[in-house]
Structure formats: C-alpha cells, structure tokens
Image (tube, rainbow, N blue to C red):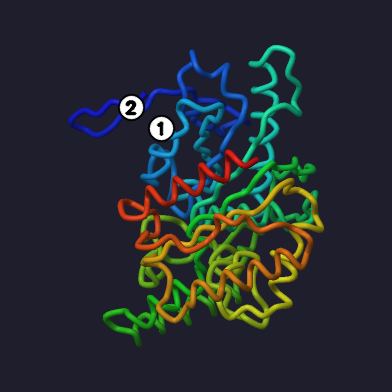
Amino acid sequence: MTSRGDRGPSHSGVLHEYAPRLVAFEFTSPAKASSKQNSLIFVGGLTDGFCTVPYVCELAAALEDTDWSVFSLLLTSSYNGFGLSSLDRDVEELGQCVRFIRDLKADRIPGATSKHGKIVVMGHSTGSQDVLHYLHAPNPLPKTERDIGLQYMHRPELDGAIMQAPVSDREAVQAILKSANDPQEARSAYDQLVSSAKIEPWTADQFDSILPMKMTAKLGLPGDAPLSARRFLSLVSPDSPEKPSQDDLFSSDLNDKRLQETFGQIGIRGILQSKLLVLYSGSDEWCPPWVEKERLMQRWQQATEAGGAKWDENSGVVPGASHNVQDEGQKDLIDRVLRYLMSL
C-alpha cells in the first residue's frame, strides 16, 4: 500500500536483512506475502537506492494482485558506495539475496521447497551490468586478493533476467567531455585522472587509492562520492575498445569477440533458465547521440543466441523513455515486464 503526504509517498512492505548489513525491501503487505511465491529483485544503478527509480513503485503496484512480489535491493555499492565497490562484489551479494529469497518463500508456503517459486533479477543502468556479469562471469568467480570479504560462492540459477537502460558508462563520460562548457578543461581532468589512477591504483599499505572528488566531478560523476582508482578505470575503461574493462559491457564500439565473451557466455554458463529481456530507453539522456540503439541491440541478440541463450520477444527500444523512465514510456515498460513475467 502506498500513501502520499506533504513530504512524498510512503510505502508499506517488509524489510529483510538478507546478509549482515545488507537489506532488501519487499513491496507487499504481510497479509499478502504468503500468497506471493514468485519474486522480482530490482537492482539500481550508480547512486541508486530505495525509491530512487520512479517506475519501481509503479511496477510493484501493477503486480500487487498477482503472485509476484517486488524486492528493491541495497548492495554495498548502493547510493554513494559504488566508487569503492565492484561488479564482482555486487554479484556475490546478489547471489546471497537470491538464496535468501528462495528460502524465505519456501518457508512461507506450506509444502514448498527452495525450488518452488520463480526469481527474476531486473537491473537498471549499471544494475544491468550487474545482471550481465551475474550471467556471464565464471561461477563461482575466481578469487582475488583485492576484494576483501567476498565469499566466492556458486551463484544460484535465475528463472529470468531483465536489463533496463543498459548504457555504457565509458561512452556517457566521453559524451560529457565533448559537450562540457570547457571541453579542454574536462579532457585535461580526464587525462590527469587516468594517469594518476594507472600510476598509483593502490596506496603504500595496499588500500584503494581515492581520486580527488573535485576532479571526478568535472566528468559528470557525483562530486560527493569517493571513487577509487580501480573503479574509475573500470568505469571509464581508457584502453577500450581494444582492452575493455570489467564494467565496459555495453559500449557500441566493442567488437564481436568481446560480445562473445559477455553476451555469448550466458547460455554456456547456464545460470539463466529462460529468455533475456533487454529494454533500452528511446530518449535516454545518458546515451550518446552516435549510438544506434536498434543496431546495438541486434548485435547483443546475435551474440546471446549464438551462445545458446534465448532473447525475449518483448525486448526493444522503449519509445520516448528517459534513462529511468520517469514519465513517458513508463506504461510501455511496465507492460513489457508484465508480459515477460507472466510468460515464465
């Protein structure tokens, strides 16, 4: 249930601690929770958290009378935590949430097991990078000494996966450099940050080096969010397209080999048990003008299907939709998601 006061809407539901210091909000009343055996887990993009993407609450309302409940997920990287995290950490935490929800739904429904009920993960913006990384990366992830605290557990299978507004962070930054009030100053800041990040990615005692926030703000990145050299290089991927970083999954200039290593691995990993739904916003303000959205999605589809995975027929460019689909295109987006969920 949603109510609106002078300070904005309020939402009733259930807050779950799915892992230490990590929570997910389920948009459902306790009375209806026992009848909702299926789950849609929403993962936001950079700086996102609870209720920062407007269509999530509308999607939850559209599913209120169905057997689906919507979970809005907080990760270590939520809000301003993205600059000190990584896709590896995101998918490890996402896997923890999937396991938690499977057990939660099994406990709620008499006679059910953890195999009952469907789970779909929907990513928005950089959350789409989380979805693709979850589906294509080795399972479990290879161990690294840099991401302290990761458990490197086997990621659970998903009954469905949705990517919404899968724009390239690298191309978004490049577009900002070109359109800046002072392009020369912006390019100089970019070059200095790349050089500094490559020269000293770690401090002398092996902690992440933090870049000057007054410099990263010149590139359109949040000026109040600490950003490590490691995550910065992953987001802007300065050696692309020849050597794309972990975060560089959606750039339009990536070659077919790179797409085979990402989209093409979905079917091979076998984590996704149905089709992949991809929804690109037609008027995405973070998508550079040189990107041919339809052509780019055709390449993604070809790579996905070449690897043995399936592409959902509801995929496509949502006409008029902004990056987070605030108004125009919202009904179209929700209708596509509902058709996808009901087809599983």
- The answer to whether the residue labelled 1 contacts the one labelled 2, judged by CB atoms less than 8 Å apart, is yes
Label number found at residue 2: 2
**Direction bottom: furthest residue:** 184
Between residue 343 and residue 75, name the one nearer to us.
343
Q: Work out which quarter of the rendered image holds the N terminus and state it.
A: top left
Label number found at residue 61: 1
175 is higher (above) or lower (below) than 321: below
> Residue at position x 37%, y 50% from top?
330
294 is higher (above) or lower (below) than 320: below
Q: Is residue 189 left or right of residue 198?
A: left
Task: Assign a secondary structure to mark 2.
Answer: strand
Q: Is residue 167 left or right of residue 1?
A: right
CA neighbours of label 1 inside 10 A, class few (<14), some (14 to 19), many (20+):
some
The image shows residue 215 at horizontal and vertical percentages of 39, 71
Looking at numbered disc 1 in the image, what kind of residue is underneath it?
Ala
Between residue 177 and residue 196, name the one nearer to us.
177
> Residue at position x 37%, y 66% from top?
283
Q: Say which label, 1 or 2, has the lower sequence index.
A: 2
CA neighbours of label 2 inside 10 A, class few (<14), some (14 to 19), many (20+):
few
